[in-house]
Amino acid sequence: MKTLVILSSILGDRSHSKQLADHLIARVKEANPAAAVKVRDIGAQPIPYFDGNTAGALFTPADARSVDQQRIVELSDTLVAELMEADRIVFAVPVYNFNLPAQFKSYLDHLARAGVTFRYTPEGVPEGLVKGKQVFVLTARGGKAEGTPSDTMTPYLRQMLGFLGMNDVTFIAAEGMAMGEVAALEGVTLAKQRIDALVLESAQASLAA
Ligand SMILES: Cc1cc2nc3c(=O)[nH]c(=O)nc-3n(C[C@H](O)[C@H](O)[C@H](O)COP(=O)(O)O)c2cc1C
């Protein structure tokens, strides 16, 4: 089983969502030391904003693209290919200003491509083409908002990932990161316990399959 991990915090090694992703990777490796895990850190190496040049490159036929346009499409192709190759996808996503970081939105903008990651049926119904993935979204936030209207990120991500075909999505949140040391430790500990349970469940399901 191949695991792709996308980190998106701007805080590098101080990131709580990265801490959760590192924990999940450690558990996956414990369960299977040979497990293939690929990590992309779009906080450290941001994906460019999806601007007019990006849209222009993607809408230009392959044989008519300039060198710059080819480079733009290559990045999108690479991001899509690594997503398609993965069986398990881990998105580590901090909450910034009630929603996901701009760099993660840019990443999603580069993934959403008609005819590649989604399409419309003749009846006009959208169909996601990123199918069969087990997805974990590991979030960290300063306050506590899970399950309340203030959590605008979870519904958006569920909608967007579902649109691309990713419907098996589990959200795990470390909450209270800015509410003092005790609350932060409790939030991270609870999230790690949920990760442990899910990795164990997943390993048992693979053994049983
Ligand atoms: C620019 C910025 C905006 C933030 N906005 C929110 C917010 O809207 N709600 C919240 O609960 N926490 C907010 N926080 C706190 C972060 O969610 C918290 O620091 C969390 O640990 C970030 O994840 P990370 O450690 O992986 O970067 C914000 C932090 C930053 C730096």
Image (tube, grey):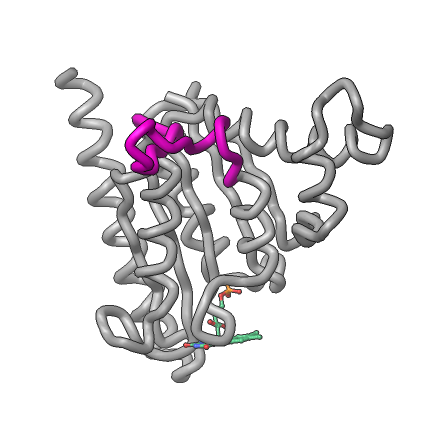
User: How far across and down, in percent of the image, does residue 184 sit?
Assistant: 38, 73
Q: Residue at x 20, y 44 (%)?
A: 197
Question: Hey, which residue is sitting farthest left in the picture?
Answer: 208
Residue at image location 59% in from the left, 42% down from the top? 110
Q: Nearer the viewer, residue 39 or 33?
A: 39
Q: Position of residue 195 (x, y in %)?
A: 28, 47
- Identified at 61% across, 64% down, the residue is 11
Magenta span: chief secondary structure: loop
159 lies above or below 63: below
The C terminus sits in image quarter = top left
Q: Is residue 59 left or right of residue 28?
A: right
Indicate the quadrant where residue 101 lies: bottom right
Magenta segment boundaries in residue numbering: 112-132
Q: Give x and y (percent) for residue 188.
A: 35, 63
Compared to residue 138, the image places residue 62 above or below, namely above
157 relative to 56 in the view: left or right: left
Q: 41 or 164, which lies in front?
A: 164
| 75 to the left or right of 160 | right
Q: Of 39 and 74, which appears nearest the observer?
A: 74
Q: Position of residue 141 (x, y in %)?
A: 41, 71
Residue 37 visible: no
